[in-house]
Amino acid sequence: MTQTGTETDELRVWVDQDLCTGDGLCVQYAPEVFEFDVDGLAYVKDGDGDLKLAPGSRVDVPTHLRLDVIDAARECPGDCIHVLRRTDDVEIAGPDAD
């Protein structure tokens, strides 16, 4: 399994709430990036900790959390976390990754 781009490219992440199972693995992996809202679904947070509730909202992944966010996407039972390279929007982890 290659980790294309995880070391040098900046990443962005978003959660598809329509597929979220509310399992919570993402919050365990990276609580600085993921958080539950009152609806019991996971959402992403920006660098200031503000929850992004709009569907498809993307946030930058802090460099020190890249592998945690990628692992969260790979382990997510709902297959709802999308991790993209910022430079070209290619999904490197999540349901649409190659």
Image: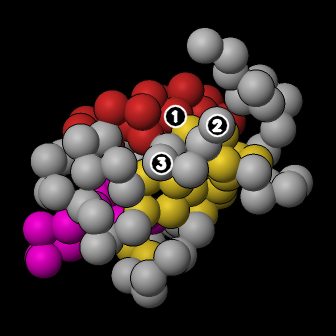
As measured in the structure, the alpha-carbon distance from the residue carrying label 1 to the one carrying label 3 is 12 Å
Q: Report how far apart the C-alphas of labels 2 and 3 lie in the structure.
A: 9 Å
Say which amino acid is labelled 3.
Pro
In the image, what residue type sits under mark 2? Asp
- Residue at mark 2: 98
For label 3, the crowd category at 10 Å Cα-Cα, with few meaning under 14, some 14 to 19 and many 20 or more, is some
* Rendered location of residue 38, percent (x, y): 12, 76
Report the span colored magenta. 34-45
Instruction: Please tell me the numbered disc located at residue 70.
Output: 1
Dividing the picture into quadrants, the one containing residue 9 is top right
Choose the circle earlier in sequence order: 1 or 3: 1
Does the stretch in magenta take in 46?
A: no
Q: Is residue 89 above or below residue 92?
A: below
From the viewer's perspective, tell me whether residue 11 is left or right of residue 93. right
Q: Position of residue 51 (x, y in %)?
A: 39, 73
Is disc 1 surrounded by few (<14), some (14 to 19) or many (20+) residues within 10 Å? many
Separation of marks 1 and 2 at Cα, in angstroms: 14 Å
Residue 28 is situated, as x and y percent measured from the top left of the image, at: 25, 36
Mark 1 vs mark 2: which is more N-terminal? 1
